[in-house]
Image (cartoon, grey):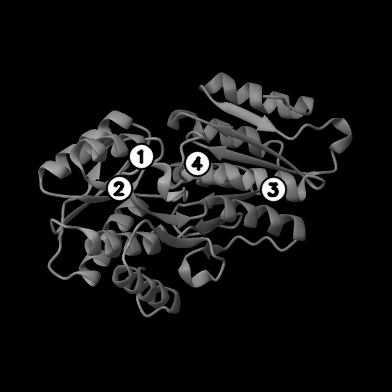
Amino acid sequence: MALGTLRTAAICASVLALAATGCSAEKTDAATSGKTKVGVLIPGSISDAGYMQSAYEGIERIKKDLGGQVEITYVEKVAPADYQQALVRFAQTSQLVISIGGQTDADVRRAAQQFPAVKFVEVGGPPTPTANLAAYDPKQDDAAFLAGAYAALISKKGKVGFVAGLEIPPIVAVAKQFEAGANHARPGITVLPPQYTGDFDDVAKAKQAVTADAGAGGDVFYQILNSGLQGMLQGAKETGTKVLGGPLVQQCSTDAAFAGFTKSDIGFATEYGVKQLVAGTWKAEAKPFGLGSGTGASGIVLCGADATVTAKIDQISADLAAGKIKTS
C-alpha cells in the first residue's frame, strides 16, 4: 500500500514493527502539512465483513469527502499487546486519534491521559467520556434487541443463541439485550447461554459454538464477531441453522445461511468524529448512534421474512426509536 509523507511512513513503519498490521494513508506530500491529521486504530481486519470493515468504509468516505482537509492514517490487525504503542504513535503526530472497539478501552484511556492536548474517540466502548476522550456508542444493544426479537419470531424449534468474541461489559450487555428482545417478541422462547470464543476472529471456535448450540436444539443465532462470522456460517450450513449477520449489512443472497443483518454503522461514527473536528465543534461527549439518534446508523434488514414478522419487527423498531422500549 502506498504511503504519503515521511511522517506518515514513519508512523506506519513503527506500528508495523510492533505487529503484523496493515497501514495506509492518503497519497500526499510535505506540502499538505496544513491538513488535519487523524489516526485510526483498527484492531481487526478491514475485510472482516463486519465491525472493522464498517469502520474502514467510513475512512474511505472521509478520504472522498474531506480529502482536501484531512490526512487520515489507519492501522489494522494490531495485536492486543500493541494497542497502547500504536495509539501513542498516532497521538505524537495527530490532532485526533480514533480507536475502534471496546477491547481497546483501557489502552485508549491511558493514551488520552498521556496526551491531554490530543483529542481521542473510542467507538464501541463504555459511554463514559473524559476531558479529551469522546465515547461513541453504536448502540449495539438496540440492534441486539431487534436481533433477539427477529430470531425468536423465525425460530422453528423455539431455541435461539448468541455467540461473541470477548466477554467484556459492552458485549455482555448485548447478550442480555438479545435475550430481552427474544422474550419480548415471543414469551417462553428458550435463549441458550451466550458463548464467548475468546477471539472475535477465530473461525474454528465460532464454528464450534454454532455446532454446539445446534446440538442443544438452537436454530437461529446472533453474533458479535469479526472474521469469526465465517465460522458461524460454516457451522450453520452444516447444521441447517440460520445466522443473523452484522454490523455490516450485505445482500441477502450473499450466503443462504443468513436470515438477516443488524446494522450498526461504525464508519458513520468514525466520520462523525472527524467532521466535528474539522467543523470546530468536536466535544468530549457520550454520543449514541442507536435507533433513537435519527442518524440511520442503526437498524435491521430481514431476509425472506413474511409480512407478519416484518410488521412485528417494524413496530419494535419504532418503539425502540421512540424510547417506548429501553435497552439501557
Give the amino acid type for the residue marked by disc 3 in the picture: Ile
Mark 4–mark 2 CB contact (< 8 Å): no
- The residue that label 4 is drawn on is 52
- The residue that label 2 is drawn on is 243
Residue 25: give x, y in percent of width and height.
70, 33
SS for tag 3? helix
Residue 179: give x, y in percent of width and height.
23, 61
- Give whichever of discs 4 and 3 has the lower sequence position: 4
- Give whichever of discs 4 and 2 has the lower sequence position: 4
- The reply to whether residue 102 is visible in this rendering is yes
Mark 2–mark 1 CB contact (< 8 Å): yes
Image quadrant holding the N terminus, namely: top right
Residue 297: give x, y in percent of width and height.
53, 61
**Mark 2 or mark 1: which is in front?**
2
Residue 11: give x, y in percent of width and height.
67, 28
Mark 2 Cα within 10 Å, few/some/many (few <14, many 20+)? Answer: many
- The reply to whether residue 326 is visible in this rendering is no
**Mark 4 or mark 1: which is in front?**
1
Q: Please state if 111 lies on the left or on the right of 62 as rendered.
A: left
Disc assigned to residue 229: 1
Give the amino acid type for the residue marked by disc 1 in the picture: Leu
- The residue that label 3 is drawn on is 62
